[in-house]
Amino acid sequence: MSAMQSFSIFSKAIANNRLSQYIIMKGTHFTVIAFTLLAFACSLASAFDPSPLQDFCAAIKDIKNGVFVNGKFCEDPKLAVAEDFFFSGLNKPGNTSNLVGSNVTTVNVDQIPGLNTLGISLVRIDYAPYGLNPHRTHPRGTEILVVIKGTLYVGFVTSNPDNRLFTKILNPGDVFVFPIGLIHFQFNIGKTEAVAFAGLSSQNAGVITIANAVFGSNPPINPDVLTKAFQLDKNVVQYLQSRFWSD
């Protein structure tokens, strides 16, 4: 074998070795990216109520005998009783004698300790004639509502920039869904009382009533900020704030 042939073989071997190293480095790089994306996806998947890793995790207030899980202390499953999974009273109408003419009876983890980590809750909503369950949002849950009595005009608004309004008139037996986090409302357009039940995809979906949050915050938002945001006269803003602080 000539010196030239030996050099050629040696050069190819070096090239192949560098290629192998390149492939290995690239493969490692792609593997890191794949694991990063997987971790990110998992973090999104657990952004709301996490899936339980046991049958149940009934909440207790006594921290001496519990483990803190998902916002509540859990009791030893062996100490759980049927009352931890029970609530009575949704057959009773709520008091609608208020300014908006509606009342929400909530059944979440605060009422049923056994709901802790199960990702579900329930409400009963009573409406006086022409009563309103005002514009609100649930930051941690989707709502599915079924009308039992009366006629409701319901709707929700999508996020920016479209701000599309979806509305529907519901009668007994009709069902409507309000996607998580979107502003929504229910209005009794009938001359009689109305009743609806709603399920939420969280043990505690939370609620932000828009008017209360904006004009009734504690402490109050600077009127100059609201004047600019709503393009209103400052006196109007201060009047609206006074309506929520008069109580």
Image (cartoon, rainbow, N blue to C red):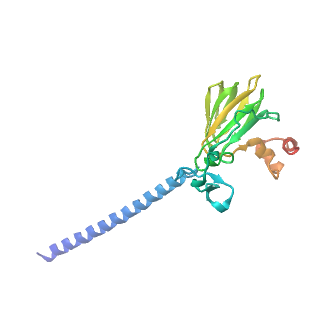
Total numbered circles? 0
Q: Is 59 left or right of 243, judged from the image as shown?
A: left
Q: Quadrant of the C terminus?
A: top right
Residue 157's spot in the image, x, y percent? 66, 36
Up-down relation of residue 204 to residue 105 (above or below): below
Q: Quadrant of the N terminus?
A: bottom left
Q: Residue at x 16, y 75 (%)?
A: 6
Image point 74% across, 42% down: which residue? 210
Where does the image place residue 77, in percent across and percent down from the top left?
Answer: 57, 54
Name the side, left or right, on which 153 lies relative to 233.
left
Nearest the eye: 94 or 38: 94
Residue sitting at x 59%, y 52%: 57
Residue 126 x %, y %: 73, 32
The location of residue 195, given as percent across then percent down, is 70, 29
Question: Is 14 placed above or below 29 here?
Answer: below
Q: Does the image show residue 160?
A: no
Task: Say if 60 sits above or below 198 in the image.
Answer: below
Residue furthest to the bottom in view is 3
> In which image quadrant can residue 136 be found?
top right
Q: Residue farthest to the top?
A: 191
The answer to whether residue 198 is above or below residue 150 is below
Q: Quadrant of residue 63?
A: bottom right
Front in this rendered view, residue 206 or 240: 206
When asked about the image quadrant of residue 142, the answer is: top right
Viewer can see residue 80: yes
